[in-house]
Amino acid sequence: MRTGRGKAVSSAVRGAVRKRSGGLPGGGRGRRVVTMALALGEGGGGSRLRRQLESGGFAAAEYVKQLSQQSDGDRDLQEHRQRIQALQEETAQSLKRNVYQNYRQFIETAREISYLESEMYQLSHILTEQKGIMEAVTQALLLQADRDDPALGARRAAAADPFLPLSAKEAAASEEGRQRTLTTLLEKVEGCRDLLPESPGKYLVYNGDLLEYDADHMAQIQRVHAFLMNDCLLVATALPNRRGAYRYDALYPLEGLAVVNVKDNPPMKDMFKLLMFPESRIFQAENAKIKKEWLEVLEETKRNRALSEKRRLEQEALPRPAPTPPESTNPFEEEEEEEEEEPSAEEEAVDLSLEWIQELPEDLDVCIAQRDFEGAVDLLDKLNEYLADKPVSQPVKELRAKVDERVRQLTDVLVFELSPDRSLRGGPRATRRAVSQLIRLGQSTKACELFLKNRAAAVHTAIRQLRIEGATLLYIHKLCHVFFTSLLETAREFETDFAGNNGCYSAFVVWARSSMRMFVDAFSKQVFDSKESLSTAAECVKVAKEHCKQLSDIGLDLTFIIHALLVKDIKGALQSYKDIIIEATKHRNSEEMWRRMNLMTPEALGKLREEMKSCGVGSFDQYTGDDCWVNLSYTVVAFTKQTMAFLEEALKLYFPELHMVLLESLVEIILVAVQHVDYSLRCEQDPEKKAFIRQNASFLYETVLPVVEKRFEEGVGKPAKQLQDLRNASRLMRINPESTTSVV
């Protein structure tokens, strides 16, 4: 009961965390929450949580609902998850201790079981040999008795089955002997117990030891023993330290087996190859004579198998006369019999003797070998259409079994075509052929999964092959072009391939999110981890947003995902740059002498006018004097330029999740300058300097702060009450500069 409740709690907690944090299902966070919730019932700590789970009226949904209502945000849920993690770790440690304590006993028990299994197998082998010896002795005695007294042998045969001709009896005895020999041999092979009951007509044709070699490097692999039966070839590997014992390795039907003679090339000789699509194996016989016997017996057995199969299909295709029903004396049954005769007359036997049906398995093998996937699927569609309205008889089932084996082979080849290990050149269109054939085979889910895995590997490879340039912005341009172009091509190809499979689109959205995470990892590593300037980071983010908006042309908007993935790095960049500005302002304030600026040349004054105009200060001319003098302090002017530059770059990075971060950073920066001016007004005693400080304060309060408020409102779309309150709170010091009251 505890396990079921733990699963319910884990599912509910995972849903709550996902709702709070905007995560999608299938991520690592959900799996960790499931693991932690399952550990609640076994941990050493968290007794209150354990008691809640063990109570009879515990409801997981209500518990998580209450937890979500009581929490203030993600932080409470994260703390709760950490407590669950502690319980899970404690449970894991307890389990490890239990395992280590019993580890020696586990090893000894396994060793005893292995010894017992070996002894039982040896005992079974001895009993089988004794049984074979007794049967051989009995058969020899009977044959000797028949030779001594032919009449006695005839009477014994007639007593066994008086209606069986003598030749048939000999054939039955021969077949029984071959089956007995096969049974005796296969009992030496582990893993073949279920082979004989499934096919009672199976008998042994030929067997012998072979050496297997690697097809690529021609290195010896292992010694095997091959059993050729009338319908299949069994390959078993020799067991070490157990003479005459083997382990099952593979079983190949003769219909799909091809034998190829390997030309002798000393020292490699007496070899032949077995082809079983899509694999092949090379074996070496003991000498040339045994190799020749293997080749002849394999070909002869294959021919006999094909002839018997063809003869059986022809016999089953012949119409069988219906049994004559017994005469009935009931006159009222005549009408019922007439009605029953009509549907029986309509039933027709499925004609499988058509040439294209007989050759269908071989044609499928040829199409698969020649990579004619479309032709193979066309043949399968033709067969399905032919058998759509036919009754399911035993011959049809056997044909379906053969065809299903080819379908599995075709599916494996198509899956290999879409595997990421294959060449990723050619773009998404290179996968269209394999994807379309998998969809025709009814494997749309597998086709979607493999297609997305292939494209993910292609995008990852393209990003990894990008050359990191010295200029960050140049690299980001290339990165965005490569990634978003690949994403756009993949989306268009996906829409073309899976137009009729609406259920696959959710998988594509999940894949697009994971791909975006991979892009953001590469983006952040180059832009934020390398401590680029805020202006460079703003330009890079702007480029990424512009490329992301191109996806909206096909109905795919991933802007919110890139915002969610970049919000942490952008917050860190804003706070870091804010700290730099505050430190620089404090350093200038510590060296402030409250003197007018002398720019020395008209060119420098004109340049300053342009800079202040670009910052939004249009009334800067009223603060300029004659001969290149400016009636403002260098500290206030530098603060104005630096603050407005910070605001402009931050607005390029702005999205709603960063509103409070940007606003609080601006308030902190402005407070540093405001506190310095107010403190100077209270402490300065020189009337001339005091008048100059008031002029700088007037410029700061009446010009700079309104410009900051206006630009923030234009960039964000709504006014900032905190900035208005800051400017209004500063009015006290301007009205009564002699006051010692702090603005802060």
Image: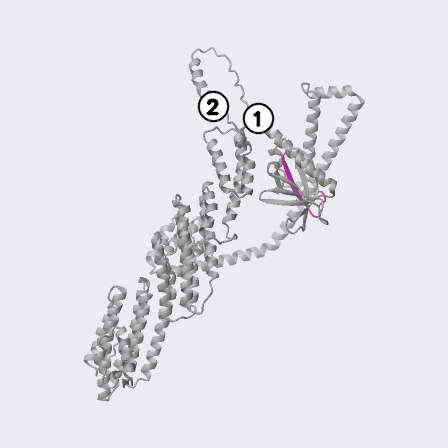
Residue 405 seen in the current view: no
Q: How many marks?
A: 2
The residue pinned by badge 1 equals: 314
Relative to 709, is 488 on the left or the right? right
Question: What residue do we see at 70% from left, 37% from top?
Answer: 128
In the picture, the disc for residue 572 is none
List x then y, in percent, for residue 220.
68, 50
The mark found on residue 347 in the picture is: 2
Q: 65 and 174: which one is in front?
A: 174
The amino acid at mark 2 is Glu
**Furthest residue in direction right, as rendered:** 148
Decide if residue 429 is on the left or right side of residue 618: right
Binning the other alpha carbons within 10 Å of mark 1 as few (below 14), some (14 to 19) or many (20 upward) gives: few
Q: Position of residue 83 (x, y in %)?
A: 43, 60
Q: Nearer the viewer, residue 77 or 230?
A: 230
Relative image position of residue 139 (x, y in whole percent): 75, 29
Q: CA distance from mark 2 to mark 1?
A: 19 Å
Residue drawn at (22%, 79%), measured in percent from left and top?
621
**Left or right of 263 on screen, residue 500:** left
Q: Which residues fall within the magenta stretch?
A: 231-244
Query: Given the image, on which type of amino acid does mark 1 rest?
Result: Glu
